[in-house]
Amino acid sequence: MSSASAARKPHLNLVVIGHIDHGKSTLMGRFLYEIGAVDERAIKEYEEEAKKIGKESFKYAWVLDRLKEERERGITIDLGFYKFETQKYFFTLIDAPGHRDFVKNMVTGASQADCALLVVSAKEGEYEAGMSPGGQTREHAFLAKTMGVDQIMVAINKMDTVNYSQQRYEEVKNGVARLLRMVGYNVNKVQFIPTSAWEGVNITKVNKDKTPWYNGPSLLEAFDMFEEPPRPIDKPLRIPIQDVYSIKGVGTVPVGRVETGVLKVNDVVVFMPPNVKGEVKSIETHHTRIEQAIPGDNIGFNVKGVEKSQLRRGDVAGHPTNPPTVAEEFVGRIFVLYHPTAIAAGYTPVLHVHTATVPVKFVAIEKKIDPRTGAAVEENPPFIKQGDAAIVRFKPLKPVVIEKYSELPQLGRFAIRDSGRTIAAGVVIDVVPAKVQG
Ligand code: GTP
Ligand code: MG
């Protein structure tokens, strides 16, 4: 894989999502192995190490699960990043955790993605668990759409556990198609692929011996069927920060994906909400130096004049001439996906927007609206319930960057969560900017 050819191919961020244990990391570990991005020796090493702690079946998952705790528990906790190339694209793979305690990491991953692979296990009981009301097949599909991932495909995995039954495949496919239609995807454009991560089936080529009834593409072929999304280079610069490093001999290196605008070496940038400025000394994408970064690029950029301790995940970089907007309050149009009782003013759950996570208060429920037409059905309702759509005035309880959906959609859509469940999703229709100090 030469980086020169990678630079010429369009870049896509792919997030891999789905219910816990459905085989996301294993499928992608196996995929990377089959395309030669990971060598045999590494897999052997993982196999031996994994065997020692009785986790042999996770040898492929270990390509992406690198944390000690992830390997010991046999689950993904934080996002795992990996790069690979197909004929058409250069991909950044973002492996998300399925565990319900780590959905916030999944949301961060989805907020950075152009496209998603939803992994659904066909195994008896596993498909059903993911699709249950609290299941993450359901929750992740909803969140991916909410966070603006407009293209999705589905791997129906662990087909070996059901003897590659076409009947089971159709059952799972029809159920997932119904779910995707409900959350807003155009199902006619969605590829479904029967796979076995464990036996290596339909990953880089279609295995007719195992699935003679299947006429579609392999996983690798399907990746090239994604379309390149628009790159809004003429909008103001916005880079939500995903992580910050301090590198010896280099300095402070924030990492994130350019959502809009163009970042160039020598630019002065401002990070909001902390309102600190610095000068961009260098930009790198996957260890390759570049002179400018455009929307969709995952970059690390060295800034002079800013300390690592001044920045955190959720801050947003922009140009001082048009800095990211810190919200005192904002008005959102939301849909309530789940709530055990009723939501009234004063309710204070957690807001997820781009890479930020902050507590947020429902200040006022201004209108209940018809979810289909948007027409008001009740002014100032005392409460809203599951299945309702509403216009709500929110107050973030910590400084956070929020933009209007109509201007910068990437920073204007959000999810609301509470006690480990996704409560609502929505878009920002208005922002009251905060008076910024500094
Ligand atoms: P989280 O990241 O924790 O949500 O899980 P995950 O979806 O990444 O699942 P992971 O890859 O860690 O796999 C969970 C278990 O399922 C491991 O024991 C895998 O070996 C097993 N597994 C994954 N894919 C397959 C498959 O195709 N067939 C069979 N039989 N087992 C599989
Ligand atoms: Mg995993």
Image (cartoon, rainbow, N blue to C red):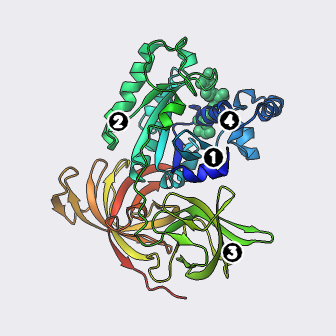
Residue at 80% across, 72% down: 249
| Vertical relation: 168 (above or below) 111 | above
The residue carrying mark 4 has its beta carbon less than 8 Å from ligand 1 = yes
Q: Which mark is residue 61?
A: 4
Residue under numbered circle 3: 309
What is the C-alpha distance between the residues marked 4 and 1?
Answer: 15 Å
How many numbered discs? 4
Between 165 and 73, the one nearer to me in the picture: 165
What is the C-alpha distance between the residues marked 2 and 1?
Answer: 25 Å
Q: Is residue 376 left or right of residue 77?
A: left
**Sequence-first disc among 1 and 3:** 1
Between circles 3 and 2, the one closer to the viewer is 2
Residue type, label 1: Lys
Residue at 65% across, 39% down: 75
**Residue 198 visible within the image:** yes
What is the C-alpha distance between the residues marked 4 and 3?
Answer: 33 Å
Q: Are marks 4 and 3 in contact (CB under 8 Å)?
A: no
Residue under numbered circle 2: 189
Callout 3: SS: helix
Quadrant where the C terminus lies? bottom right
Instruction: Where is residue 296? Give x, y as percent.
Output: 50, 57
